[in-house]
Amino acid sequence: MGKPTSIKTSEEVRDRLRVLAEERGTTITDLLEELATRALTQAEREQRAAEAARELGIEYDEQVQQVGQDAWSKIRAHQGGAAA
């Protein structure tokens, strides 16, 4: 683990992180580390989408990219998340 640092957030977010960590039997620090290592960056998502398209024999062009983004936006909206 690297040098400890701090992250500023609201009390509500801190309290939620504490509950989530307790439910998982871990610490807020470990919970944040797991999230940061598990969540993909935009570049990583694009790379995986291109690899999946290649495996399916589909050319990963702007049209395919847009259809995929639209599909994920609809999925997030139905899950109660923010539509992007």
Image: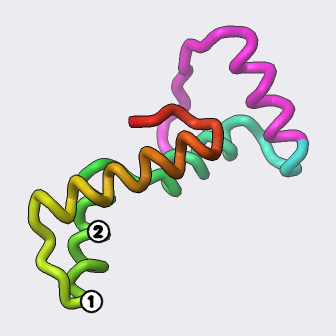
* Residue 30 % position (x, y): 68, 45
Q: What type is the residue that disc 2 sits on?
A: Ala
* Residue 75 % position (x, y): 52, 51
Compared with 27, 58 (above or below) is below
Residue under pointer 2 = 49
Compared with 69, 2 (above or below) is above
Q: Earlier in the sequence, mark 2 or mark 1?
A: 2
Left or right of 82 in this view: 65: left
Residue 25 is inside the magenta segment: no
Q: How far is the residue under mark 2 from the one under mark 1?
A: 10 Å
Q: What type is the residue that disc 1 sits on?
A: Glu
Quadrant in the picture for the C terminus: top left
Q: How is the image coloured?
A: rainbow
The residue located at (47%, 47%) in the rendering is 74
Left or right of 66 in this view: 77: right
Q: Total number of numbered labels?
A: 2
Extent of the magenta region: 1-22
* Residue 14 % position (x, y): 72, 20
Q: Which mark is residue 14?
A: none
Residue under pointer 1 = 55
Compared with 18, 44 (above or below) is below
Choose top left, top right, bottom left or bottom right for residue 31.
Answer: top right
